[in-house]
Image: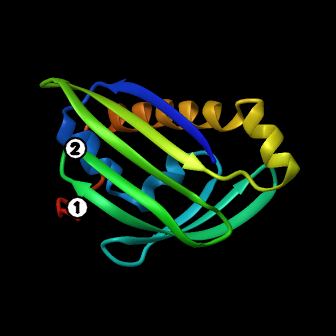
Amino acid sequence: MSQVRESIVVDVPVATAYNQWTQFESFPQFMSGVERIEQRTDTLTHWVTKVAGVEREFDAEITEQVPDQKVAWVTVGGEAEQSGLVTFRPIDQVHTEVTLMMDFDPEGMAENIGDKLGFVDRQVKGDLKRFKHFIEDRGTATGSWRGSV
């Protein structure tokens, strides 16, 4: 298992950052390699990804969700094995630290080499930067889900 941890400060209130993160179907707008996400239930999402020409499909189950604090998930089938946690920490009324931690199991020689070269770390860092621009440019979330899991 490999791990990645990246943080970024976004210039929006914690509720805005959190609300946007609950809109999984918008992830392709700021996450490279994510082709499509379908929200199947309150806790189940279906992902289609394409990274370096390799397409994968898998389901992810939300295992814990606390409004304005965190969202945790684990894959539950398909072609990827990972788990993760994103946390939201208010710095002040208009700034939020977003931290993404992910454990993943690279498959095959190409993914293992990419992992050793820091590809996933750079991709997560880039995704968080794109999230920052996405939410700051909008100023508001595209929607929200405020339930707890």
> Looking at the image, is 63 positioned above or below residue 10?
below
Name the residue located 34 percent from the left edge and 33 percent from the top edge.
Answer: 98
As shown in the figure, which amino acid type bears the numbered disc 1? Trp
Q: Quadrant of the C terminus?
A: bottom left
Please name the colour scheme applied to the rendered image: rainbow
Q: Is residue 43 visible?
A: yes
Kindly check if marks 2 and 1 are in contact, taking CB atoms under 8 A apart as contact.
no
Residue 138, position as x, y percentages in the image: 32, 38
Q: Is residue 56 toward the left or the right of residue 61 in the image?
A: right
What amino acid type should be assigned to the residue bearing mark 2? Answer: Gln
Give the total number of marks visible in the rendering.
2
What residue sits 26% from the left and 57% below the top?
65
Image x and y of residue 8, in percent: 40, 26
Q: In the visual, does 132 lie left or right of 13?
A: right
- Asked which secondary structure carries label 1, the reply is loop
Q: Residue at x 53, y 53 (%)?
A: 28
Q: Earlier in the sequence, mark 2 or mark 1?
A: 2
* Image point (55%, 47%), residue name: 103
Q: Residues within 10 Å of mark 2 (few under 14, many from 20)?
A: some
Q: Which residue is under mark 2?
A: 69
The image shows residue 5, relative to residue 145, as above or below, that is above
- Residue 99: name its quadrant: top left
Q: Which mark is residue 87?
A: none
Residue 141 appears in the picture as rendered: no
Judging by the rendered image, the residue that carries numbered circle 1 is 145
Q: Regarding mark 2 in the picture, which secondary structure is present there?
A: loop
Seen from the viewer's position, the closer of residues 134 and 18 is 18
For residue 22, which quarter of the picture?
A: bottom left
